[in-house]
Image (cartoon, helix red, strand yellow):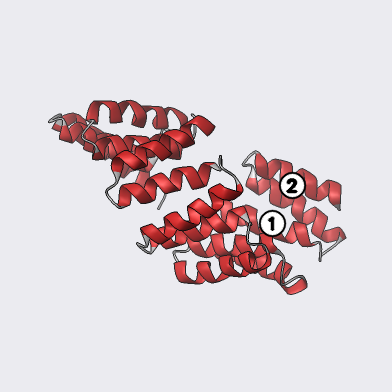
Amino acid sequence: TNALSNKGWALNNLERYNEAITWYDKALEVDPNHLITLNDKGLALDNLGKHNEAIVWLDKALDIEPNYTNALSNKGWALNNLERYNEAITWYDKALGVDPTHLSALTGKGLALDNLGKHNEAITWYDKALEVDPIDLSALNNKGVALNDLGKHNEALFWVDKALEVDHMDQYVLDEKGRTLVELGKHNEAITWYDKALGVDPTHLSALTGKGLALDNLGKHNEAITWYDKALETYYKTK
């Protein structure tokens, strides 16, 4: 079972989620109650956008071990992805009740609070995550996002730059730097960072829209429309 499950996890780390699930299923044929495999299958489904299906498999793991922190936290993430933020917080809290230093639950709770518009509370939880791991990419960048949402753009830039020190190629961090620079009125600089994000993923919706906005703010309206059109094309392809 371990070899089958471990192959699935390796494929999961390569973002080859459908292949990962094939190997998790092989492992579950051998041992249908293998806790880690049930959790990891749920995580792979969540990464594929199949959030309700993910919860079914995470619940199977939690039926066997109700205090399994990874499954508790991953259920929170699936609910977060379904925009059921208050429910997500309930499950993050269950994970943190077992392990108050569970990094994924700390950052997840921060994100859920952020999505509920509770930006100051969110920052408190990102800070708790950064006490556990000072270079956690998600906590660093999401703290920048929350500060931007509070209108504290210079502070946001500080934390986004810290995230870039950890991973200078992460498309979400690159995009957030673009957004921060737009908020600071530095539109030409912003475009440079949106282009970096689009170099990693040419379909990054927020970067396409952000580049359009920056061009619009520079008075380059025809160019802006081109990028808004790219954003709309991308958006409708995913629907």
Residue 221 image label: none
Q: Are marks 1 and 2 in contact (CB under 8 Å)?
A: yes
Q: Is residue 138 above or below residue 227?
A: below
Amino acid at pointer 2? Gly
Disc nearer the start of the sequence (1/2): 2
Q: Residue at x 43, y 48 (%)?
A: 143
Q: How many marks?
A: 2
**Quarter-of-image position of residue 123:** bottom left
Which residue lies under the disc numbered 1? Answer: 41
Residue 41, x across and y down, in percent = 69, 56
Relative to 28, 15 lies left or right? left
Relative to 225, 70 lies left or right? right
Q: Residue at x 56, y 43 (%)?
A: 136
Residue 8 image label: 2
Residue nearer the viewer, 208 or 169: 169
Work out whether residue 81 can be spotted: no
Q: Is residue 34 above or below residue 168?
A: below
Residue 9, x across and y down, in percent = 72, 46
Relative to 151, 197 lies left or right? right
